[in-house]
Amino acid sequence: MTRRTDVVVIGGGQAGLAAGYHLRRLGLDFAILDAQAEPGGAWQHAWDSLHLFSPAAYSSLPGRLMPPQPGETYPDAAHVVAYLADYEQRYELPVHRSVRATGVHRDGELLRVETDSGAWSSRAVISATGTWSRPFVPTIAGRTEFQGAQLHTVEYRNASELAGKKVVVVGGGNSGAQIAADLAHDTDLTWATLREPRYLADDIDGRALFDHATARRRALDEGRTDTRGVASFGEIVAVPPVREARDSGLLKAQPMFTRLTRTAVTWADDTTVEADAIIWCTGFRPALSHLAPLGLRSPRGRIPTIGTQAVGEPRLHLLGYGDWTGPASATLIGVGRPAREAAHEIHHRLAGVPRHCR
Ligand code: FAD
C-alpha cells in the first residue's frame, strides 16, 4: 500500500523537526520518517562527556527556546535529546519511527519514497538525514593489518573503556580535540592531526560562531564577498575540558602518521608508537544514498542546490548537511532559517504561486 501526503520529510533529527515545525504552521499535510526507534537524531550517539559549544538559549529550534540545563552553561547531549523529544511532542509532529527511506523516485507529478516498511507518495520531499550514519575513515596503508581496536567518533563512549591503554586519536577538528582531552588523563595518549591544531580564541564559543554565520548569510544575500564561514579564524572551540588539557600540556599534536602495522602507528621517518586502540575522529559524509535513484549528485558527491532546493529536482529540498545547504544549517540554532525557507518554497509551489511572486 502506498500512503499519500503533501510532503515527506526524511529524517527526524533536529533538521527534520525544524522543517516539521514550519510545515505545520503553513497547514501542510506531511509525514516525517525516521530510521531510529527513539527521538533525538544523532545526539543519541554522542560520547558521554560531549557538551554543546553554545549555551542553551543559543541552541534552540524555531518556536521554542531550549531550557537551560541546571548547573551547566553548556548543555550535554542527553539534554539535547530530551529537548528534541519534547519539541516533537509539543508541536505534535507526525514522526514515523523505525522507518528507513531506501529510495526516492520520480513518479510523474509525484515523488515516491520507498521505505523498509512500505511506500509514500508526495508532492515534495525534504531530505534531512544528517551525516552521523556515514562515518568517514581515510585510506591509510596497513589499516586492515592493525590488530588493536579501531573506533570512529560515533563508537567512542568514555575514557573508562580505554583506561590505562595506549590510544591514538586521529583528527584535528572539534571531535578529535574533545575526545583527546577526554582521554588525556587516563590513557597513554597520542594525538595525530593532519595540520597543527587551530584553536579559536578562548572567549569564542558557539554564540560567536553563529553571529559570524549570520553575517556570512547576510553577505551572501546581499551579493557581497563570501567570508567562508568561521574556518578563516580557527577550527577548535576551546571548550573548558579542551582548554584545561591544552593548558596543562596534555594536548600535544603529532603530525599524521603514514601507516599502521599489526601493533603500532608509524611515521615516514620510522618513528613508531605502539597502540592498543585508534580512534578515528575523521568526520562524516552526508547520508544521501536514498536519493541515488534521482541521479542528482555531482562528481564531488554533493547535490547542487540553490538554497535548500535541488537544482536538478525542484520538488526536493536538502536540509542540515552543512554550509552547503545554508550557513550554519547543521547546527541547532542555524537550521531554523533554511527550514523555514524550504517549507515556504514548497508551500508556494504547491499553491501554484509563480516564482517571481514568492
Ligand atoms: P541527525 O541528527 O543525524 O538526524 C538525522 C536523522 O535522520 C537521524 O535520526 C537518522 O537516523 C535519520 N536517517 C538517516 N538516514 C535515514 C533514512 N534513509 N531514512 C530515514 N531516516 C534516516 N551543533 C550545535 O548546534 N551545537 C553544538 O554544540 C554542536 N556540537 C557538535 C559536536 C559534534 C562532535 C558534532 C559531530 C556535531 C555537533 N553539532 C553541534 C552539529 C549538529 O548539531 C549535529 O551534527 C546534528 O545532529 C545534525 O542534525 P540533523 O538533523 O541534520 O541530522
Image (tube, rainbow, N blue to C red):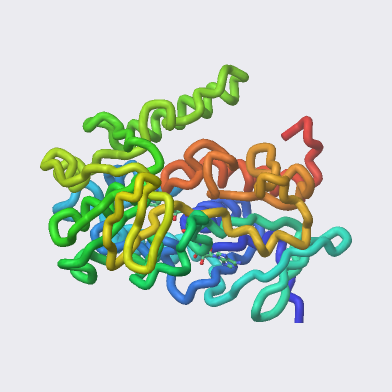
Q: Where is residue 126 in the image (x, y as percent from the top left)?
A: 64, 55
- Is residue 56 shown to the viewer in this render? no
Q: Position of residue 328 (x, y in %)?
A: 47, 39
Q: In this view, does 249 lie above or below 220?
A: below
Q: In this view, does 260 lie above or below 245?
A: below
Going 85% across and 64% down the picture, which residue do you hit?
Answer: 107
Q: Quadrant location of residue 223?
A: top right
**Residue 88 or 9: which is nearer the viewer?**
9
Q: Where is residue 207 in the image (x, y as percent from the top left)?
A: 33, 35
Q: Where is residue 256 in the image (x, y as percent from the top left)?
A: 38, 46
**Position of residue 144 in the picture relative to residue 224 (left or right):** left
Task: Return the residue found at the far right.
Answer: 108
**Position of residue 143 in the picture relative to residue 297 (left or right):** left
Q: Is residue 283 above or below residue 58?
A: below
**Position of residue 84 in the picture relative to residue 25 (left or right):** left
**Residue 57 or 288: which is nearer the viewer?**
288
**Position of residue 206 in the picture relative to residue 310 (left or right):** left
